[in-house]
Amino acid sequence: MDPTILYSLLQQVSDFDLFTLDDIDAAFQNVVRLKYSQNHLLNDKGEGIVIAPHVAGHDLGGTVWKITKDGEDVVYAVDFNHRKERHLNGTALGSFVRPAVLITDAYNALNNHVYKRQQDQDFIDALVKVLTSGGSVLLPVDTAGRVLEILLILEQYWTQRHLVYPIYFLTNVSTSTVDYVKSFLEWMNDSISKSFEHTRDNAFLLKYVTLIINKDELERLGDAPKVVLASMASLEVGFSHDIFVEMANEAKNLVLFTEKGQFGTLARMLQVDPPPKAVKVTMSKRIPLVGDELKAYEEEQERIKKDEALKASLSKKEEMKASLGSNLKASDPMVTDASTSRKPSNAGSYLVGNVDILIDGFVPPSTSVAPMFPFFENTSEWDDFGEVINPDDYMMKPDEMDNISMLGAGDGMESKLDEGSARLLLDSKPSKVISNEMTVQVKCSLAYMDFEGRSDGRSVKSVIAHVAPLKLVLIHGSAEATEHLKMHCSKNSDLHVYAPQIEETIDVTSDLCAYKVQLSEKLMSNVLSKKLGEHEIAWVDAEVGKADEKLTLLPPSSTPASHKSVLVGDLKLADFKQFLANKGLQVGFHMQIW
């Protein structure tokens, strides 16, 4: 999810200090944007390595990485989906054949999915059953990943079955998420992009899903049947945490998980079989400081400011003393001896030219600073209209414009974040987090359906067999699932299979030997190239030698044997016919079926 949103959520319920918004901005400054299938050559330590992203099919922007070095490919394919979905194409992993190393996951190695259509119908039937009985459904989801597929499923079946129950998508950024997604149709599957090209119909113009960024509208509905998709999927923080506490003690309600909870989270605790009858939850919120707490906070901040100001002042004095001392040592202040200048009334007079100060009556030590701050003349240029300025100094930077646009009326942060998150990010009023633990009786129904968008065990085995890597590395899976997939691949192929533990280092270096050689100028001067489309090709006979301590291809010492004719490329009959026609030959091709 967006780290900015995660930061705001954690700040609401804790004194989170692992990273700041400045850290997030600094991290994103290092991000390099790539398009699918775009080759990107690394520099510095990665020189000679080419990386290219390909479609993973797991979520919007999900990537399978192809890493090429010295003609060998390493494919990193974790969390991929081979099936075409409502908004995504399947993975491009099947287009890779015989890479040197394939790194993939064993996450779903023990699971086999039902047919997609059947799963979707079971999902809708479960929702409708609860809604018709007067209950509500909570779907804990992420903010902008797999939730997009669920939104399209709900839209489709609400249209087909003419359902009128309200659906709410509640996250801090629900409105901006869907707005952005509307402009990324070219990253989605072919049917969505073609539909938009022909009819201008955007699949994410949602008719039945209401986008909200705070709980006010839900509270106005009361106990009316509804479907709420709320962040976060873990139930640890966010709207889903609060809504679960409100809905859990009603037997008519349903909490339906669409992905496996991570270990140690509330969602994972509720997904065990059988589910617990009661769970302990922590309710936290941030409130402003008042009274004695506010006074103590302000006094502490004032003390900190004074300490920082004192340190800054001392540091500045030390820097100035060092700077002026070095200037004096370098004879920047011109000192004029009494014998070479106009004699004053007192002996020992010095004229410091750079500082424009006449010092009478004493001789300052060489290590002392000047008795006043130095004066630096303004060297600005002037013309008939005044001082010449640089317009770039007064141009507003893009990030400053973004900050102002966020604060502007009508198009401010409120359109992207809920009121609490916006206040937290934009307001620096002193506050504190208060928490209380409570026990929640779990009377509502709990269910899990897999909408994580990962290939199941049967499909993963099929993809690995098709790609046929020389070496296979299995990560990101339970010990049982990893061992199962490892045994299957070892039994059914000659693969070298590795299953490293966390922080374990393995060596998957290829057994092949690759060398870099350079072509000598003497060799290339005798090469006869022939044009082939946009390229030129030639036979090269050479011997390997050394030049400047580098492997080099040199002209052969003896006359090489003649070469046989070789067909290069694909012969197209239409091009061949045109070639013969240009030579003055009449040609006709006839197909004969035996």
Image: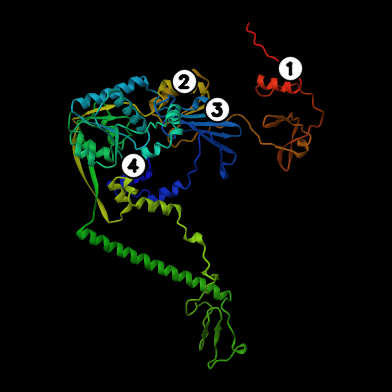
Mark 3 = which residue? 99
Judging by the rendered image, the residue that carries numbered circle 2 is 462
Which quadrant of the view contains residue 592? top right
Residue 520 % position (x, y): 74, 38
* Mark 3 / mark 2, whichever is N-terminal: 3
Please, what is the three-letter code of the amino acid marked with disc 4?
Val
Q: Which mark is residue 586?
A: 1
Q: CA distance from mark 1 to mark 2?
A: 51 Å
Q: Residues within 10 Å of mark 2 (few under 14, many from 20)?
A: few
Tell me the element at label 3: loop
Q: Say what amino acid the circle numbered 2 marks.
A: Ser
> Could you tell me which quadrant the C terminus lies in?
top right
Could you tell me residue 397's position as x and y percent? 45, 55
For marks 2 and 4, give the one nearer the viewer.
4
Pick whichever, 128 or 325, lies toward us.
128
Residue at image mark 4: 173
CA distance separating discs 2 and 4: 38 Å
* Front residue (pair 226, 262): 226
Residue at 28 percent of width and 24 percent of height:
124
Distance from Cα at disc 3 to Cα at disc 1:
47 Å
Nearest the viewer among 541 and 60 is: 60
Write the residue at 48% across / 36% down: 505
Binning the other alpha carbons within 10 Å of mark 3 as few (below 14), some (14 to 19) or many (20 upward) gives some
Whichever of callouts 2 and 4 sits on the residue coming sooner in the sequence is: 4
How far apart are the alpha carbons under marks 4 and 3?
40 Å
Can residue 571 be seen from the camera position used here? no
Q: Are marks 2 and 4 in contact (CB under 8 Å)?
A: no
Q: Secondary structure at mark 4?
A: loop
